[in-house]
Amino acid sequence: MKQPKAFASKIIDAIRADGGVLHLAGGEICLPRTFGFCRGVTSALVMLEEACQRHTDSTTRLFLLGQIIHNPWVNDHFSRRGVQILRPDQVRHPEAFITASDCAVIPAFGVPLDIEAHLQSIGCQIVDTSCGDVRRLWGWACRAASGGLGILIFGRSEHDETVVTKSRLAAAGGKYLVIGNLAEGRQFAEMVASDQPPQAFRERFGPATTNAESPQPFERLAQVSQTTMLYDHTMALRDILRSGFARRYGQEELNQRLLFEPTVCRATQDRQNAAVELCKAGCDLVVVVGGFGSSNTRHLYELAQAHAPTVFIEDAGAILSPSRLRALDTDQDRPVTVKNWLPRRRPLHIGVLAGASSPEIVVGQVVEKLAEFLR
Ligand code: SF4
């Protein structure tokens, strides 16, 4: 499926055709072999674009239930086309906004079941762009929950996809626990291994991360991951859990007590592998381009940092000058001004990474701006 024209970039097409490298007098700008929009994002954008075209001259209002993907440029693009994007608090109350004569667009991460049921009950048009990989995750997790297993979700509790996964599990009568990082995974595994009481569980894990009152529902456990997590961390968490469960129940019970489904999607893995390959080839600087709310783009940033000085920017407007740039500080979770970000030596090798929600047009503008400094 081809991405809508509005998101394409001539310079990116040209660099791709030239083997992924832009050669300049002062160095090179390199792109990974796989980057940018994945199949799920492309499909969501094509569906929304088609809905916009269908309703250009009609009186039907188009409502998007949250961001279509985590990229401000893309969401602004659709706002300008007349799509009304509901905020998360508004998505919880679709009855206040959407009527039977409207068209409701479900974003790539999906919506909770009760909201979907409400839309169906009022009979409005529904365009469901939720990604097949996300739906497969829900299906597997809900089946495991029906089989009596507690579900451990490795992801960000407040991320749209995980919010929907939690709600679907709760609707299926399942118990879930969200683990955000490996340190939390170790704490939970230790809790299991040392058979800690419900109070310790409640003190450690609040209602934002679990709907269980004690670790008991997780004595038989199925682990899934938000589709955009780091694949290596997902595997590491599995080992941490196995070791905690082995200490408590013995090796022989592991396979009955622990199920694992590798739900990090193929597109995420491919982009992570390609990013590491590019960084390992040798970069003086890596520029990661994407929405600051994009989970998969944040993970590319984490990976790149292990190999080279790395900055994470949203678009070309963040590049203020060769000595000043607005980049995300992931510790503070806000943009900050970075000084002297561009090394002075020449030739300079710059790698540019882009997450599955980063439009090529924005990546292309960043490349053009960087190229000005290497002419
Ligand atoms: S990153 Fe994976 S799960 Fe998310 S939209 Fe793309 S293919 Fe689907």
Image: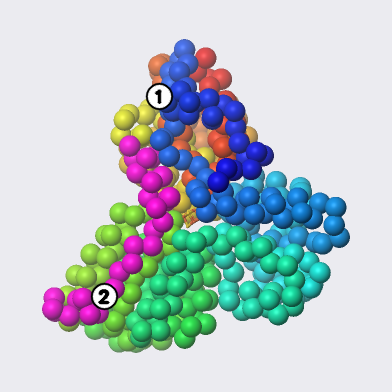
Look at discs 1 and 2 and give the one toward the viewer.
2
Q: Would residue 116 be found to the left or right of residue 231 on screen?
A: right
Which type of secondary structure does the marked residue at label 2 adopt? strand
Name the residue: 40% across, 69% down.
153
Of the residues shown, which amino acid type is indicated by label 1?
His
Per the image, the residue denoted by label 2 is 258
Place of residue 338 in the rendered image (x, y in percent of width and height, measured from the top left):
51, 36
Place of residue 193 in the rendered image (x, y in percent of width and height, measured from the top left):
21, 78
Residue 290, labelled with which disc? none
Residue 131 in view in this figure: yes
Which type of secondary structure does the marked residue at label 1 adopt? strand
Per the image, the residue denoted by label 1 is 349
Q: Which residue is more in the foreground, 112 or 53? A: 53
Residue 177 in view in this figure: no
Q: Which residue is more in the foreground, 254 or 202? A: 254
Give, as a single range, the part of the protein colored magenta: 250-277
Q: Could you tell me how far apart the alpha carbons at marks 1 and 2 are, in whole angstroms?
A: 45 Å
Pick whichever of labels 1 and 2 is earlier in the sequence. Answer: 2
Residue 130 location, quadrant: bottom right
Q: Are marks 1 and 2 in contact (CB under 8 Å)?
A: no
What kind of secondary structure does the magenta stretch mostly adopt?
A: helix
